[in-house]
Amino acid sequence: MFETTVRDGVCRIARDETRWLSTGYAGGESHGPTAYNVTVPDGWPEMDLDEYIDERRQRAGFDDPGPTLLTGVEQRHAHRARLGPVEAVVTAGVSNPATLPLEPTDERGEPRSDDRPVGTINVVVGTTRSLAPGALPNLLTVVAEAKTATLLAKMGFTGTTTDAVVVACDPSGEEAAFSGSATDVGAATRACVRDALVASLDSRYAVGDVDLPESVAEAAYGVVTDERADVEPLD
């Protein structure tokens, strides 16, 4: 489905005539042949992101622009999962976990003052189906749910502070009006995200040179959201 090529820390994810929807930098909906996941170096300084992304893409020998995600995770830890009409490519790092407890907690993390991708879980999901206008954005929610459920089961976190998702579909494929978890596309997406995410985490943290944090407090950076909102019934 996707053709993936990795050069110089840049993963190109390619398929002709694809409809993309990105939550990453300069995201939104677009049409084209490519999306990218780019590994940034340690100590990456603040800079013009458009210029940086263009320079990294061209240095890697990729001409076509496209939606681009940024991560501190090396591309050797990227994993792909396929099931039915869906494919997912995931890189996962959790140095900056985020969690949302139901009850107040004494646990505190050290938030960063910017959104630089110190860890980041980046997910790219594509389907050979042609999704209806509302079904492609809905696929983002399916991915987020699958990512959160997997992280809670494996680590007790809900995500990281810089997670990003790209979803994609083939406008010429078989039409699908919906993409929820009970549909073929949604069910396959859930399985692909879960399995690729677990594989990427196992790859990155099994090598021994990076420790898997056991709590937000133990992580290099992190956020615990335990503030309480005012809630009242609707009239």
Image (spheres, rainbow, N blue to C red):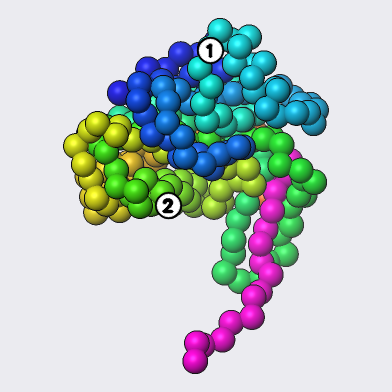
The residue nearer to you, when weighing 153 against 60, is 60
Q: Quadrant of residue 8?
A: top right
Instruction: Give me the residue at 68% from left, 27% from top.
Output: 50
How far apart in space, not on screen, are marks 1 and 2 (Cα)?
31 Å
Q: Is 160 displayed left or right of 2 in the figure?
A: right
| Secondary structure mostly seen in the magenta stretch | loop
**Residue 210, horizontal then vertical, whole percent:** 65, 28
Residue 53 visible: yes
**Residue 185, horizontal then vertical, whole percent:** 27, 43
**Residue 81, horizontal then vertical, whole percent:** 35, 30
Instruction: Give me the residue at 37% from left, 29% from top.
Output: 18
The residue nearer to you, when weighing 170 against 141, is 170
Residue 49 lies, with reference to residue 54, above or below; the image says: below
Instruction: Determine whether the residue tagged by mark 1 lies in a helix, strand or loop.
Output: loop
Magenta range is 217-235
Instruction: Give me the residue at 29% from left, 34% from top.
Output: 171
Image quadrant in which the N terminus is located: top left
Magenta run includes residue 152: no
Q: Amino acid type of disc 1?
A: Asp
Instruction: Determine whether the residue tagged by mark 2 lies in a helix, strand or loop.
Output: helix
Q: Amino acid type of disc 2?
A: Thr
**Disc 1 versus disc 2: nearer the observer:** 1
Q: Quadrant of residue 168?
A: top left
Residue marked by disc 2:
141
**Circles 1 and 2 in contact, beta carbons < 8 Å:** no
Residue 67 lies, with reference to residue 193, above or below; the image says: above
The residue nearer to you, when weighing 79 against 62, is 62
Task: Rate crowding at label 2 as few (under 14), some (14 to 19) or many (20 or more) other CA atoms within 10 Å.
Answer: some
Question: Which badge, 1 or 2, comes first in the chain's sequence?
Answer: 1
Q: Is 20 displayed left or right of 129 in the figure?
A: right
Instruction: Give me the residue at 60% from left, 27% from top.
Output: 73
Residue marked by disc 1:
63
